[in-house]
Amino acid sequence: MKNYTVTVNGNAYDVTVEEKGGSAGATRKTPPMPSAAPAAAPAPAAAPAGAAGSVEIAAGAAGKVLKIDAAVGQAVKKGDAVVTLESMKMEIPMVAPQDGTVASINVAAGDAVEAGKVLATLN
C-alpha cells in the first residue's frame, strides 16, 4: 500500500492506494485537510482604487483571459464584448449586460481566472 497526498482545487486529500492484481484502487479517503487559502493576485494598475463601477462583469467559467476588448473610459452597448476568455479551447466573450462606460478592467491578458471573478465594471 502507498500513501499519497492529492490536492484538487486547493483541497488536500490523504489517499491510500493498494495494488490488486495489476490494477490500483483507492481504499481509503479522508476528509479534506484545512489548507491555507491561495494568495489573491494583486489588482492590475489598470484599476485604480475607487474606480470600480456599479455594474460588474464576472467570468462565466474558469479559464484564461485571452484578450481585453474594451478600454477604461470606453462607452459600450449591451452585448459588446469587454473581455474574452479562453476555456476548454473555446473563446468566450464576456459582454456588457447594459449600456455604459467601462470603469475598470480588473484582469490582464494571460491571467487565469475562476468562474465568478469580477473581470471588469461599468458605470
Image (cartoon, rainbow, N blue to C red):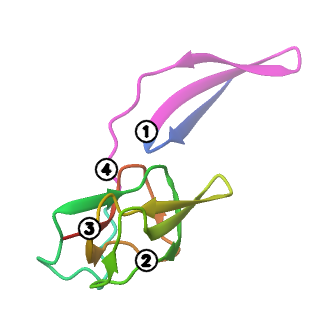
Mark 2 Cα-neighbour bin, 10 Å: few <14, some 14–19, many ≥20: some
Q: According to the image, label 3 marks what residue?
A: 121
Disc 3 residue type? Thr
* Mark earlier in primary sequence (4, 2): 4
Determine the secondary structure under disc 2: loop
Q: Which residues are magenta?
A: 12-38
Q: Is residue 41 magenta?
A: no
Determine the secondary structure under disc 3: strand
Please name which of the two marks, 2 or 1, marks the residue nearer to the observer.
2
Residue 85 location in percent, x, y?
Answer: 53, 63
Alpha-carbon span between mark 4 and mark 1: 9 Å
Residue 113 to residue 20: above or below: below
* Quadrant of the image occupied by residue 3: top right
Mark 4 Cα-neighbour bin, 10 Å: few <14, some 14–19, many ≥20: few
Q: According to the image, label 1 marks what residue?
A: 11
* Mark earlier in primary sequence (2, 3): 2
Alpha-carbon span between mark 2 and mark 1: 27 Å
